[in-house]
């Protein structure tokens, strides 16, 4: 088993062990990094359907950080997708817009928030891994320097594990975040979680203290 495969298994094991609130924040953070990368592409390379999901991802963030009123917006966003031509069972004969990495990750993150099922967060992780290959192919097409594929995959999964470490320090707040948190708590989590989790250039800052709720 390659190093990145071992790390992928470690991420999935961690996701299975944490609360649905922690999984929701993790999924939103990974989806945000993919969405931000897509938004940074030249206009001609941006997918309209993916770009249309930005409001949904913003609502997911509000929900996972404790704003219970975001549930309706996320539910409507998912429903619009389910009723659209992009949700189909036509295989390769149907539109593949929802299979773009950032789009798929955003939809999985929305489902992770709505239903709390661990599989959706795992699928977000896997889409980020797949996106590494797509990104390297894009760099090659642009005749830019292309990192070693195994090193790039390892870096992505190490980032995901660091994300989970950071999220674990807020486990007590996030355990019941789906029921709603105070405005002050949501604002604090936005600063302490959303900002570092979505940074493309530096790992999240981990405080040298045990996770909340630990003995």
Image (cartoon, rainbow, N blue to C red):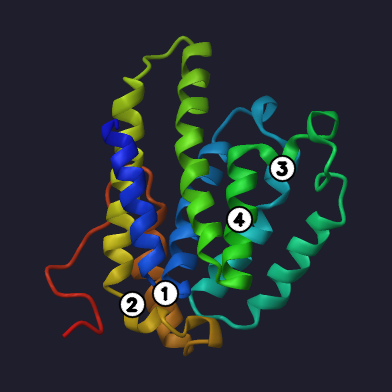
Q: Are marks 3 and 2 in contact (CB under 8 Å)?
A: no
Marks 4,3: beta carbons within 8 A: no
Q: Residue furthest front?
A: 1
The label number, if any, that marks residue 19 in the structure image: 1
C-beta proximity under 8 Å, tags 1 and 2: yes
Q: Quarter of the image containing the C terminus? A: bottom left
Q: Secondary structure at mark 4?
A: helix
Q: CA distance from mark 1 to mark 2?
A: 8 Å
Q: CA distance from mark 4 to mark 3?
A: 11 Å
How far across and how far down the image is residue 116, in percent?
Answer: 55, 71
Residue at figure coordinates x 32%, y 26% from the top left: 150
Please give the residue where the numbered disc 4 appears in the rendered image. 108
Q: In terms of sequence position, does the residue under pointer 1 or pointer 4 come before the other?
A: 1
Residue displayed at 17% across by 67% down: 207
Residue drawn at x 63%, y 63% is 111
Residue 33, placed above or below residue 168: above
| Mark 2 or 4, nearer chain start | 4
Read off the residue under disc 3: 98
| Circles 2 and 4: CB atoms closer than 8 Å | no
Q: Earlier in the sequence, mark 3 or mark 1?
A: 1
- Mark 2–mark 4 Cα distance, whole angstroms, equals 21 Å
Q: Spatial distance from mark 3 to mark 1, Cα to Cα?
A: 27 Å
**Residue 93: percent from the left, percent from the top?**
85, 29
Q: Are marks 1 and 4 in contact (CB under 8 Å)?
A: no
Which residue bears the numbered disc 2? 171
Q: Residue furthest left?
A: 208
Closer to the chain start, of discs 4 and 3, is: 3
- Mark 3 closeness class: few <14, some 14–19, many ≥20 residues within 10 Å: many
For the question of whether residue 196 can be seen, the reply is: no
């Amino acid at each position: 088993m390659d190093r990145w495969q071992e790390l992928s298994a470690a991420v999935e094991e961690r996701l299975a062990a944490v609360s649905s609130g922690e999984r929701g924040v993790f999924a939103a953070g990974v989806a945000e990094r993919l969405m931000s990368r897509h938004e940074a592409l030249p206009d001609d390379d941006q997918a309209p359907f993916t770009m249309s999901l930005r409001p949904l991802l913003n609502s997911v963030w509000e929900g996972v950080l404790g704003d219970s009123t975001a549930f309706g917006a996320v539910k409507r966003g998912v429903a619009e997708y389910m009723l659209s031509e992009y949700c189909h069972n036509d295989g390769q004969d149907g539109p593949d817009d929802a299979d773009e990495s950032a789009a798929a990750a955003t939809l999985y993150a929305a489902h992770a928030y709505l239903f709390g099922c661990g599989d959706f967060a795992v699928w977000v992780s896997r889409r980020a891994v797949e996106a590494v290959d797509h990104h390297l192919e894009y760099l090659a097409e642009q005749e830019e320097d292309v990192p070693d594929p195994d090193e790039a995959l390892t870096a992505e999964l190490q980032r995901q594990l660091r994300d989970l470490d950071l999220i674990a320090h807020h486990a007590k707040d996030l355990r019941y975040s789906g029921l709603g948190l105070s405005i002050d708590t949501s604002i604090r989590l936005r600063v302490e979680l959303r900002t570092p989790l979505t940074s493309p250039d530096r790992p999240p800052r981990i405080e040298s203290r045990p996770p909340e709720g630990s003995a």
